Amino acid sequence: MVGSRKSASAAVLCCLSTAGAFAPSNPCHGGRSSPHVSQGCGEGSTTSSTVGSSTSLDALPPLIIGPMIRRMTGGGEKNNMPMANYDEAMKEAPGLRVGAEAWKWPPVWPYDGNFFKRQVELDNAKTSSSPLSMINNLGEAAENASEEGDAAKKEVSFDSLEFWQGKGDVKTEIDSRTVEKITNHYSFYLRDGMSVLELGAADNSYLPETLKLNSHVGVGAVQSQMDSNPSITSSFVVDLNDVVEDDGLSSDEWKEKIEDNSFDAIIMANTIDFLNNPREVFKSAWRALKPGGVMIVPFLSKDAYVSEFGDAFTKQWRDMTDDQHMWVCGSFFQFSAGDGWEKLQGFDVSPEEAGDKLNKKEGLFDKLKGGNDDGTPPGAYVVQARKKAELDPTKGDVEEVIRSRMWMMPTLEDRDKKLVAPRLSRAYDVLGDEDKERMMSHLNSLPAIYESLIKMDQFAFGFSMQAQLAADLVGDPDFVGSDEQIKNMKMGLGLRRPSEDFWAPVGKLTGSMSPEDKVNLLAYIVPRTGSGDAAQEEALQAFVDGLEPTFDVVRSKIPTLSEADVQLLGSELLAAEILIPGRSTREQFAQWIDALTAADLEFILAKRKSYKEEASKEMEEFKFARDEVQKKAEERREKIREQVMEARENRSVIFNPGTGRFEKYEQKEEGFKLPGF
């Protein structure tokens, strides 16, 4: 992320980066999307010296699905035990395998780009660069080889839309027993009168014949196939692999025809195996769904149609097993809108004749053979979730409201959202009504803030510190996230050349302050910038001009004070009085600080430090109280579940199929005696 910087020396000049303060140290430089960072470089964790800037693709899948796969494929009698409780299973379609509470995710997107490439793209990447380019950059020969490699790479790049349109006459022939299972699953969740959007639509949607939808919009790659589909009422072509990174589908026609919050359900059968950018596709789907709407994603076992469409399979589909596919598909929901999805569930709806493919150990012969030559139907699986409604800021828990506003925010990882939400909640609580509304409107500036903060991962600037800076900025009524304010934040962080008249001297004069105190000062200065107000600009200049004289006064009054405390005390006194126009003039501030005694200054400093300690203590208490509420809620749910199970076990009435009535039955030591039998 920051590897493109020529050196860390520029950071030495800025407000938050003096020698050693934020210089690269034990680098969390795998990038924010690297799972190595999340495991080894979190707050309070230690980092292995083996952590690198690149990720090993072979090591990626276990980070996200390994523990769950081991639980699902533990062998013995537990092999077929679903990871869902009885009550949940009773409310859902048959085949529930993974319940809503069973999924566990890493804090960041755990895949690199190769995970979703086709074999031809991976092969091309291996051969496009000449070995000459790897040997000490051998001048012109290396450059020519690189250019030739780039040209070759372009020649064999995979055009998914062209591939599917070339397969326009090839129909996806699926065993009728498998189709029946998918249709039955749809029938459990789709109702007459619904509006349905189908992604990856083709000639067959596998919907129940009796289902009467209000509308069924098909979005696929081949218009002729969608035209032959009797279920679809309207359709258009979209390349689902043409996306805007971290946003969604790039198609103009999609943006014109698919409105937000407009569909009751979205179905996407046998499509995830071909997606290069699944996260963006799921983001677009989330927007299109109405709150409470369901997205249903069926897929078949990996060998179902490899002979027809194997060239379009992504690496994750080729290399992973069916049980892993279920967890990877679940991760697409999680990392597209996070908590904006609810009731995420995984189903095994395979026909009985397919056998236990989900737990089958695939051998070398199975991989070489491919297909279903033995005549058994392919396994079928479904992962689905519902869109959660965004919360009303005037109702409910403020932190949850803020979380809901961040569901679809780009740039921020799930870890960042979890760290910044409680801090924003605390900032919100202390604001007046007008400022609260303003703060909520400023939440949209978080992506711009984090676009800069992600470049600080390489420095001693932890994720919690980043979250605190983001929360302090957004919580300031004067921060609007303007380009000028973001530019000043970058200069303060050392990500841009600091201005000679402000950030360079501020950085030089506050070099002994702790990183936390620098963050606090930065959060106070940045919202004052970019206003265009002459009085505010004059106040900023007065602040930088007054730093050195203020420090001199503090040193003269308390000679034993450390330089870090001198800078902390002086800068905050100056910021509080001078940075807000109309509060104090330079002359008034000079008279005031000159009149303060050493005891006064020591008291102010002690009070300032106690605020930090109290804030830290309050944050811990806040987290503890929140965890206790969640714990008690789970205990109540568990108690209800136990009561329901006890009622079922000890009930005294049962339905007698012989008489067609509910009747009493006798409970004996050896078991129950059913009436009429």
Image: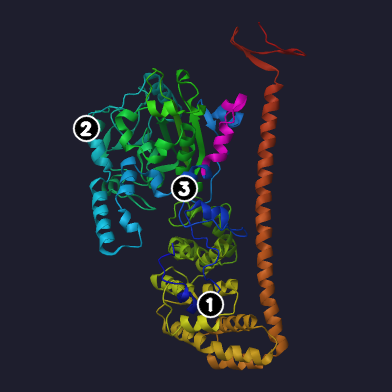
Viewer can see residue 650: yes
Q: Which residue is mark 1?
A: 18
Q: Which residues are magenta?
A: 64-83
Q: Which residue is mark 3?
A: 335
Q: Identify the element where label 2 is drawn.
A: helix
Amino acid marked by disc 3: Phe
Amino acid marked by disc 2: Ser
Q: Position of residue 408 (x, y in %)?
A: 44, 52
Q: Nearer the viewer, residue 169 or 658?
A: 169
Q: Is residue 277 a member of the stretch shown in magenta?
A: no
Residue 504, disc: none
Residue 224, disc: 2
Question: Dot 1: few (<14), some (14–19), or many (≥20) neighbours within 10 Å?
Answer: many
Q: Position of residue 636 (x, y in %)?
A: 68, 40
Magenta-drawn stretch, dominant element (helix, strand or loop): helix
Looking at marks 3 and 2 on the same chain, the residue that comes earlier in the sequence is marked by 2
Amino acid marked by disc 1: Thr
Q: Nearer the viewer, residue 247 or 314?
A: 314
Given this view, does label 1 or label 2 mark the residue nearer the observer?
1
Question: Dot 2: few (<14), some (14–19), or many (≥20) neighbours within 10 Å?
Answer: some
Q: Is residue 505 shown above or below 628?
A: below
CA separation in Å, label 1 and label 2: 64 Å
Q: Position of residue 208 (x, y in %)?
A: 37, 24
Q: Is residue 76 a member of the stretch shown in magenta?
A: yes
Q: Nearer the viewer, residue 196 or 80?
A: 80
Q: Quadrant of residue 380?
A: top left
Question: Dot 3: few (<14), some (14–19), or many (≥20) neighbours within 10 Å?
Answer: many
Contact (CB < 8 A) between labels 1 and 2? no
Q: Position of residue 215 (x, y in %)?
A: 32, 34
Q: Identify the element where label 3 is drawn.
A: helix
